[in-house]
Structures are given as C-alpha cells and as structure tokens.
Image: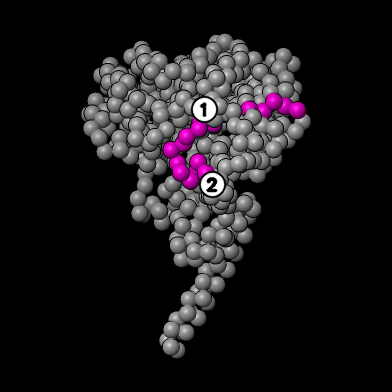
Amino acid sequence: MYFLLGSSAFLVTMHAAIVVAIGVRVVMRRAARGVALSWLLLVATLPFFGVLVYLLIGERRIGRKRSRAITALRTDFRQIARATIPVDFTAVTWPDLPATAQAMDRLGRSLVGFATVRGNAFKLFTDTQAILAAIVRDVDAARTSVLMEFYIWNEGGAADEVVEAVIRAAARSVRCLLLIDALGARPWWKGTQPKRLRDAGVQLRAALPTGLLRTLVGRTDLRLHRKIVVIDGMAAWTGSMNLVDPRYFKQDSGVGEWVDAMVRFEGTVVNPLAGVLIGDWILETGAPLQELIDAAGLGKAQPLGTANVQIVPSGPGESEDGLLQMILGLINAAQHELILTTPYLVPDDPMIVALRGAAGRGVRVTLIVPEKVDSFLTRFASRSYYDDLLDAGVAIQLYRGGLLHTKSISVDGTMSMFGTVNLDMRSLWLNYEVALFIYQREFADALRALQKSYVSQSTQLDPSLWATRPFRERLIENTLRLFSPLL
C-alpha cells in the first residue's frame, strides 16, 4: 500500500515538474498563443507522450550547421541579385497599378529581401498531362542546364517521360541538378529511377534527409515543399504540382485524382526563381556559388513580356512570418473580389480575422477547397473554421472533381498569389515554400478564369444545412481545432 502511494506521489510530482518545465520553455520561446496553448494542453493531458512529441516537433529546430549555412546563404542571395538582377529590371511602372501593389512590393522587400521584377511572359497550365509534356519538351530543348526541385517524385505514367528526358539531356552533356525531398519522395528513392539518373551523370540529391541522429540536432519533419524547374537560365516553372502523373498517384486514397496548375515564365523572374533553387542546392551540397551561377546560366534572362513578379521564399531559418504577412497584406488589399484556392485549410487567427474582415467590408470572398482530402485530421480541423467564415458571408465552394491542389489567391482582377503554399500552419511555418506575387491584370484574369472553372465543378456550402450536421462531427471538428496549430 505504502509503495503504491509512494509511486503515485512520485508520478504526480514528475507530471507536475514536466508540465512546469515544458510550460516555461514554451512561454520563453514566445510562440503564438494558439500554438503555445495547444502544446501546454497536450503536455498537461498526456505528459510523457506530450513531452516526447514536443521535443520532436514542438520547435522549429533546424540545427546549428544548417542555421549557419542559411545565414551565409543570405549573403549569397545578395550576390545572386547583384549578378543577375540589374536595377533596370526592378523599374516597375507603379502608377499603372493599384496603389496597394507598390505597398506589397515594399512589404516583400523589407521582410524577405526580394524586389519585384518587371518584364515577364507567362503561360498558365491547368492540365497535368499538358504540364508534364511541356516540361519534357523544355528538357529536350535544353543546351546547358536543367535544374529541378520537387517535394514528391512518383513513378508511373507521363512522369516517367520526364525521367527519360533528363537522362537524354545528361547524355548531351547538359548539366542536370535534381533536388528531391527525402521524405516526400521516400517510395521513389527506394525504386530504380534514382540509380538510373545517377548512372546517366545526373547530379541527384535528397533534400533534408531524415534519421534518428538528425532528430537529435533538428526536426525531421521540416520539408522542402517547393516545385521549381529552370531550363538554361531562360525559362522557369513553378506551381502546385509535384513530379507525378495523377493517374498513377495515390489512387487508393479515395479522393480522386489530384488537380494542379503550374506557370511557365520567361523573363527576368527566372533569375530569382533559379536563385532560390540554387540556394537549396548549396544548403544540401556546399557547392560553390559562382560555379552554380555559371552552370545555370543565370543572368541570361532579359525582360520579355509585361508581368511584374515578386518571388517570396519562406521556411524555418530563412524567414519568420514574411510569407504570412504578404498573404495577409493581399487579403487586406481586396476592395471588390477575393478568391482563394487551397487543398488544406488550417489557418491561424490573423488569417481568419482578415478573411472575415474582407467579407464584412463588402468584398465578395470565395474560398474553394476540395470536398475530400487525404488527411483525416486536416479534414475535420478544416471544417471547424467553416462556421466562422460562413457567418461572415464567405462563400465556401466544395470542389468535387478530385483533390484540388492548386494554391492561389486573386484580388480585384489586378493582383495574385500563386505557388506552393497551402493556407495551413505547416506551409506557413514548417515547410520551405515559394510563392509568386504577380501584379498584372492579364495574369489575374487567367488565374480568375481557372478559379471560376473550379467553382463550376463545386457545390456551394449551404450555411443552414451545414448547421444541422451531427453533434459528433462538430465535436470531432472542434476538438481537432484545438490542435490545428500542430497539424
């Protein structure tokens, strides 16, 4: 009896000590209130398990070595900018654009350091088979360099044609650099294609490798979520699509084929986009900057077209809340119409406030999300935000044509965001992302037409019917909402 009482007292004391110790650490790191409270709740209710999870993923630990490398990389980015982006490239004619566009440019410069560059021609691709075929054509036309980075690479279908095109390019002595996330593409790394690429002379590296030892020095769930292709330093691709053929990707997930969009640019924006990719390559390999600049042909891209584009990369160690502030700035700039698409909706409080505020001041706000997503936790956590948005007058469209994966925002037919970032905590705080902020009516028109095509395949959520869903669903949603900062 005394032994049991003593053991119980010891466990209670240890529990209290753990909660206090982690609580002090969370408080002193000055995390967002929602994030801090979620961790405190988890640790208090599941002390031993909660502490383990917190130590694994509770902080944006990137390790001292990577932190030093990222600090050095900021100097490299300035060198890339000086070498490839003359002052003339940033001479945007701001009076022809909404006043808020120049304010967004200033915000991006101050937070991230990249200026808007003028003189860009674009083509927005909305069919995945056409995207893969066009990338193959670009790679087959390459004469000096092919640079690629992706979160997921998956065998099967038209994606395999890209592999063959890269192998052909390497055989022509084109320098091919491929940086693929270690975790996102784990099944692919275990297949035969990586060896075939390396045997052909392709320089292939896994980004952010995982493992037990790496867990001790930094988080292993920080992922390279960017999707960038640069050809000969003259053309660049980015957008939401991984290097997969959706007909062969996650066919057993019950959500249909993934629906994506990519944009192909020629013009001055190729230089900063390539700079982001080169920076990621340096972090993983330590390769000399100037050698990469020369190999990639940076500096050859000249003004072509009329689109004004600002590149905003983000990720742990590279930026704090820069991308979030840019998105909030874009939402707050809306005067008439705001349309957003995202596959995963787990916003923080400032974003919810901004969306509700836009609707409250009379902006037509439309949020397009997939009816089905491939994550149980995210699915129910996302739904917990619908009431807040519906009450404010936001129109929520549930896309029924598959897993809508496009990440985009269009504002008043004049400004846009397009890229790799989801409207969730993971994208905004944990992933390495890249977003384009485009200040041009033509791009906004093309993006808006794409968004409207998604609406035509969607069902608008009826607030009155939504309010009648079963209590058990609301309980699950609101419970998981408590942990939404951790998803």
Task: Where is residue 120? Give x, y as percent.
Answer: 56, 14
**Mark 1, other Cα within 10 Å: few <14 / some 14–19 / many ≥20:** many
Give, as a single range, the part of the protein colored magenta.
362-380
Task: Where is residue 139? Give x, y as percent.
Answer: 36, 17
Viewer-closest of 55 and 67 = 55
Task: Where is residue 474? Give x, y as percent.
Answer: 57, 47
* 376 falls in the magenta region: yes
Viewer-closest of 482 and 466 = 466
**Mark 2, other Cα within 10 Å: few <14 / some 14–19 / many ≥20:** few
Q: Which mark is residue 108?
A: none
| Callout 2: SS | helix
- Residue at far bottom of view: 2
Task: Say left or right for 151 vs 460.
Answer: left
Give above or below for 315 relative to 272.
below
Can you see residue 290? no
* 304 falls in the magenta region: no
Q: Quadrant of the N terminus?
A: bottom left
Dot in front, 1 or 2: 2
Can you see residue 350? yes
Q: Which mark is residue 473?
A: 2
Q: CA distance from mark 1 to mark 2?
A: 20 Å
Three-letter amino acid code of the residue under disc 1: Tyr
Task: Where is residue 375? Give x, y as percent.
Answer: 45, 41
Three-letter amino acid code of the residue under disc 2: Glu
Q: Earlier in the sequence, mark 1 or mark 2?
A: 1
Viewer-closest of 125 and 135 = 125
Q: Residue at 69% x, 23% y: name it.
A: 337
The residue that disc 1 covers is 399
Give above or below for 480 relative to 195.
below
Task: Say left or right for 293 vs 386.
Answer: left
Task: Say left or right for 205 vs 22.
Answer: left
| Callout 1: SS | strand
